[in-house]
Amino acid sequence: MTTTGRGQPPAEALERILAGPTGLGSAASRFARPPHLPARPATAPAPAPAQPPAPAQPPLTAQPPVLPRPPAPPRPPAAAQPPAQPSAPAAAPARIEGLHCPPAVRDDRALADLINEQLLQWADDVDLFRSPDLRAGLLKFDPGRSVVLCHPDAPTTGHLLTAAKLLAGENAVDDYFCEPELGGTPDGLGARLAVAQSAIDPSHMPAPYDADWRAALAAHPALRAMHSAMESFTQLATPAQSHRYRHEVASLYLGYEAEAACVQEERTPRVWEYLVQRQLNSFRPCLAITDAIGGYEIPAELFALPAVQRATALASTASTVLNDLYSLRKEQASGRFHYSLPTVIAEEEDCAIDDAFTKAIEVHNELVRAFETEAAALTAHPVAARYVAGLANWMGGNHEWHAGHVGGRYATSP
């Protein structure tokens, strides 16, 4: 039986946490049950479907609130840019044979185009692009479709747009600080990422140093983007959810640094070491906000349960290994030192890359099945059930988004 780390089955631990404390003076400190959730059942229900009923929320046509500008020194406005063009309907995508993954719940091209259009306007507002090619690259990346697929329970376009801003900001940090095409280098990466973290987790210092720090944030497109995206997120998330996201991004940056160290040494890690890195350097910041983007909250103590942490880690690692598989051909064609799960398996087992690719598919599938087992044990309470359903929805949407880029950005074989 799966236990929580205190010897309790997950169902009993969920009830204990969500019931809150007992005794004199404890009534005000219990978790309030959100009005859209049903009463706790007397017995554990069957596992939740991939998408539980959404709460009563404003419709997806509702517009996001007007957001305040980040507290940064004034800078020249971005040059006028042409509007985003609607995308043509996509043909049925190809998929890697044998991958086990939850299905996507929603794919809405018109809604994705709307989010892309709003995201490009925001990106122009924060002056994210140093060239028109980078702007075109973001539209080709299609972040609007990614968040529409991965967050089918988002109650408003504002929630989807916020997820897209965070996605674009995270990718901008990766591109500008880590990728050589935009000047990224492993040399000094840790110092740059510490500043990047301060864009979402403000530093506190006396003047005039505070002004110098704000000027540094305002001077770099990736830092401006992350700061502005975090401003949007804090408007719809609780303080606990915002703190959670900051922690997940700090862990992501630690994973960046681990990879950079191996790149500097041109050392391919062992498979176990790679999987340690991948649990950090993963899509986890995107998955861990599924409740905030869905318009609800999994309480902090419930999120911290070992069983919930394990489900989150398995979902994020599996989703990132899926990216390893679809992007392998592109990375091999780059001509620079790079490693992923197939290449570390090939190195460790001294096998052909095609055989390593097949073995990596098996690792992915084992991670997904372990997630499904963990998730099934967490469905005894509606809050936990909704959260793990959100993780599954994200996994399925992420797979569908990758498959949609096969033939361009991604491929189904080495």
Image (spheres, rainbow, N blue to C red):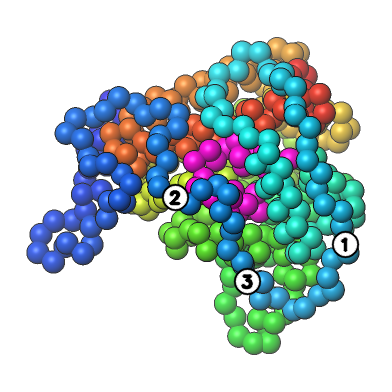
* Residue type for callout 1: Ala
Q: Quadrant of residue 69?
A: bottom right
Residue at 79% in and 70% down: 219
Q: Earlier in the sequence, mark 3 or mark 1?
A: 3
Please give left or right for residue 246 compared with residue 400 in the image: left
- Say which residue label 3 marks: 68
Cα–Cα span, label 3 and label 1: 21 Å
Evaluate if marks 3 and 1 touch, with contact meaning CB atoms under 8 Å apart. no
* Residue type for callout 3: Pro
Cα–Cα span, label 2 and label 1: 35 Å
Please name which of the two marks, 2 or 1, marks the residue nearer to the observer: 2
The picture places residue 413, in percent across and down from the top left corner, at 75, 17
Please give left or right for residue 37 compared with residue 309 in the image: left
Please give left or right for residue 15 compared with residue 290 in the image: left
Q: Earlier in the sequence, mark 2 or mark 3?
A: 2
The picture places residue 78, in percent across and down from the top left corner, at 84, 66
**Residue 269 in view, yes or no:** no
Question: Observer-nearest residue: 125 or 203?
Answer: 125
**Relative vertical location of residue 120 with respect to residue 383 in this rendering, above or below:** below
Residue at 51% in and 48% down: 59
**Mark 3, secondary structure of its residue:** loop
The picture places residue 270, in percent across and down from the top left corner, at 64, 29
- Say which residue label 2 marks: 57
- Say which residue label 1 marks: 80
Q: Which residues are magenta?
A: 142-166
Please name which of the two marks, 2 or 3, marks the residue nearer to the observer: 2
